[in-house]
Image (cartoon, helix red, strand yellow):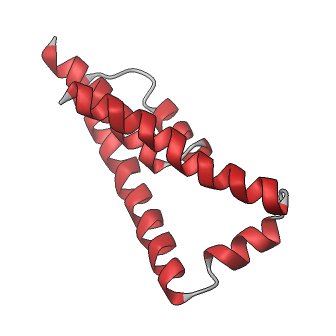
């Protein structure tokens, strides 16, 4: 599973940033346009809402599991989620968790 999590971590970094950087190249760092497009349709709002709820679940899970397994610096995974995204931070944490559990 560790290899699987590592591959997903890389994919979770590359794919979202590809689309984000494509948006920035086309529109610049236009926060208003970004928000309008994020919440522009009911289906996109559905995805954003799902992602926000999943992020909250991740916060609780990371804190509990990091405490239970004594994984240091659990706040870095939260920071990774906020800066890069959940699709990067979650598989990264699972990779580190698997490594910790194998010891």
In the rendered image, which quarter is residue 53 located in?
A: bottom left
Residue sitting at 80 percent across and 53 percent down?
A: 25
Say which quadrant the N terminus sits in. Answer: top left
Between 41 and 23, the residue placed more toward the observer is 23
**How many numbered marks, from 0 up?**
0
In screen coordinates, is 67 left or right of 103?
Answer: right
- Percent position (x, y) of residue 63? 35, 39
Question: Vertically, is 7 above or below 102?
Answer: below
Q: Residue furthest bottom?
A: 42
Residue sitting at 58 percent across and 87 percent down?
A: 41
Question: Vertically, is 42 above or below 89?
Answer: below
- Percent position (x, y) of residue 5? 29, 33
Note whether residue 70 is visible.
yes
Residue sitting at 77 percent across and 55 percent down?
A: 24
- Percent position (x, y) of residue 30? 84, 64
Note whether residue 66 is visible.
no
């Amino acid at each position: 599973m560790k290899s699987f999590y590592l591959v997903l971590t890389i994919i979770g970094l590359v794919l979202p940033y590809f689309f984000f950087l494509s948006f920035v190249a086309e529109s610049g760092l236009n926060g208003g346009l970004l928000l309008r497009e994020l919440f522009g349709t009911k289906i996109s709002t559905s995805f954003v809402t799902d992602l926000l709820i999943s992020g909250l679940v991740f916060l609780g899970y990371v804190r509990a599991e990091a405490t239970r397994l004594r994984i240091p610096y659990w706040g870095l995974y939260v920071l990774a989620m906020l800066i890069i995204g959940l699709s990067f931070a979650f598989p990264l944490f699972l990779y580190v968790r698997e490594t910790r559990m194998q010891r």
